[in-house]
Image: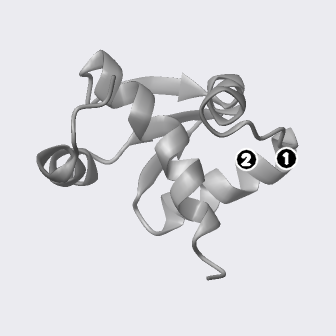
Amino acid sequence: MMLSHFTIFANAYYIRAFRREKSDLWLTIDDILENLSTEYDRDEGRLAVEDKLRDLARVVVLEFEDGEIRGHPDIYREVQQDATIIA
């Protein structure tokens, strides 16, 4: 249960990447904050989100570089195979 919230933060990236059909899409922290608000109706603090994204980068779910986020290609492909169509 403690780790379940990380799915939301990973999806804040992957949903947009799937919609754009770009496995190499780079997003900013502001993009992620917008996605959290739009997709999950969550108003999260910037520093807290950045910390969670860095945690996800440490376990290789996302890549985090210079304040921008990109998905991990293997995760993108694996989830894409199992995902229903995202509109």
Q: Indicate the position of residue 84 as horizontal and vertical percent values.
A: 21, 41
Residue for point 61% across, 82% down:
1
| Mark 1 and mark 2 residues within 8 Å of each other at the beta carbon | yes
The answer for how far apart the CA atoms under marks 1 and 2 are is: 5 Å
Disc 1 residue type (three-letter): Leu
Q: Indicate the position of residue 66 as horizontal and vertical percent values.
A: 61, 34
Tell me the SS state at disc 2: helix
Q: Is 1 above or below relative to 11?
A: below
Residue for point 45% across, 25% down:
26
Q: Indicate the position of residue 3 as horizontal and vertical percent values.
A: 59, 76
Which disc number belongs to residue 80? none
Within-10-Å neighbours for mark 1: few <14, some 14–19, many 20+? few
Within-10-Å neighbours for mark 2: few <14, some 14–19, many 20+? some
Front-most of residues 85 and 70: 85
Mark 1 lies on residue: 47
In the rendered structure, the answer to whether residue 40 lies left or right of residue 58 reads right
Mark 2 lies on residue: 50
Disc 2 residue type (three-letter): Glu
